[in-house]
Amino acid sequence: MQGIFNIIQRWIPLWNRETFFAGMSSTGRSESTNNFFNGWLPITTGLYSFVTKYEAVLIEVCEQKNAEDFASEHRYRQVGPHQALLKDATNIYTRTMFHKLQDQFDQVVRFVVIERRVEGNVRQLTVKAHSGRAESFELQIDLEKLTGNCGCKLFEYVGLPCCHPLKVFSKYDILKIPEAFIMIRWTIGANKFSRSYDESQLKGDNLRHALRHSHISLRASILFERASKMKESFDFAVLKLDELESYLQNYDDTLTQIDASQ
């Protein structure tokens, strides 16, 4: 029992709040994985059928992620005209994380901020609930560097600023979410150029379709991002795309003729 107690930071959430887990527990991850496969493959699926279907499932998941990324980037999110911080968040976070942050904003009105100590630009504060369940957290913020931390450790654990610093931002008229309180992982376009495979896997003649699809999509996204920044590079990229499309069409026609002759 003493050995288990000595490693409480590994298995009791209260003791590992300073470690980033994206808000996920070990059991939650297992349930999420099971739910994913149950949605695509019945429990009676055999090994051969699983292998053959897995590639199609992977492509479908990539398409769903791309659709969600597009929606996060282009769909308008309505906020109140005087909610400056929340309006700033619409340009930062994906749709899912924006709604989670919105839940934190909804709790801001429950708290009051009490200054305990002032040292130059650094404020040591207590953020205390005046309604609902009794809550009180210690918070420190540097108003010049716009850095700080909160005793509830939600940002360290989940990667989103909690309602307590949001209340402090409002008190000191900070109208944009400081960079120190933004985790890139949850921002719009964060996974646009991410890669979940090693380039050594691209060597060989028997590449899976899903891997070819992922790699060429990534390369194309990077090029399109660069080409879209200026009119000249955009026009040049479109010209080369037309040439590539013509080349691939001729190549496909040639293969069709060869198959027909055989």
Image: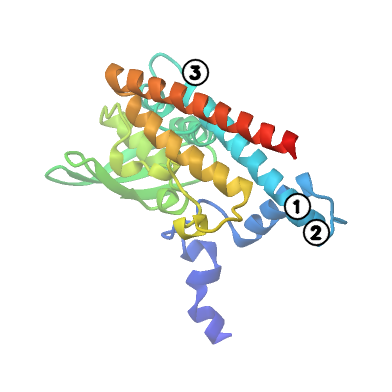
Alpha-carbon span between mark 3 and mark 2: 44 Å
Q: Neighbour class for label 1 at 10 Å: few (<14), some, many (≥20)?
A: few
| Tags 1 and 2 touching, CB below 8 Å | yes
Residue at coordinates 33% horizontally, 38% vertically from top-left? 113
Q: Residue furthest bottom?
A: 2
Q: Residue furthest top?
A: 81
- Locate the C terminus by quadrant: top right
| Circle on res. 52 | 1
- Locate the N terminus by quadrant: bottom right
How many numbered discs? 3
Res 140 visible: no
Q: Position of residue 60 (x, y in %)?
A: 66, 39
Question: From the viewer's perspective, is residue 201 above or below residue 168?
Answer: below
Alpha-carbon span between mark 3 and mark 1: 39 Å
Residue at coordinates 61% horizontally, 32% vertically from top-left? 254
Q: Neighbour class for label 3 at 10 Å: few (<14), some, many (≥20)?
A: few
Residue at coordinates 37% horizontally, 35% vertically from top-left? 166
Q: Amino acid at mark 3?
A: Tyr
Identify the residue under disc 2.
48
Q: Amino acid at mark 2?
A: Tyr
Q: Position of residue 202 (x, y in %)?
A: 50, 55
Res 78 visible: yes
Coloring basis for residues: rainbow
Q: Secondary structure at mark 3?
A: loop
Identify the residue under disc 3.
76
Q: Residue furthest front?
A: 261
Question: From the viewer's perspective, is residue 148 above or below residue 130?
Answer: below
Q: Neighbour class for label 2 at 10 Å: few (<14), some, many (≥20)?
A: few
Q: Position of residue 151 (x, y in %)?
A: 38, 53
Residue nearest the viewer, comparing 41 with 126? 41
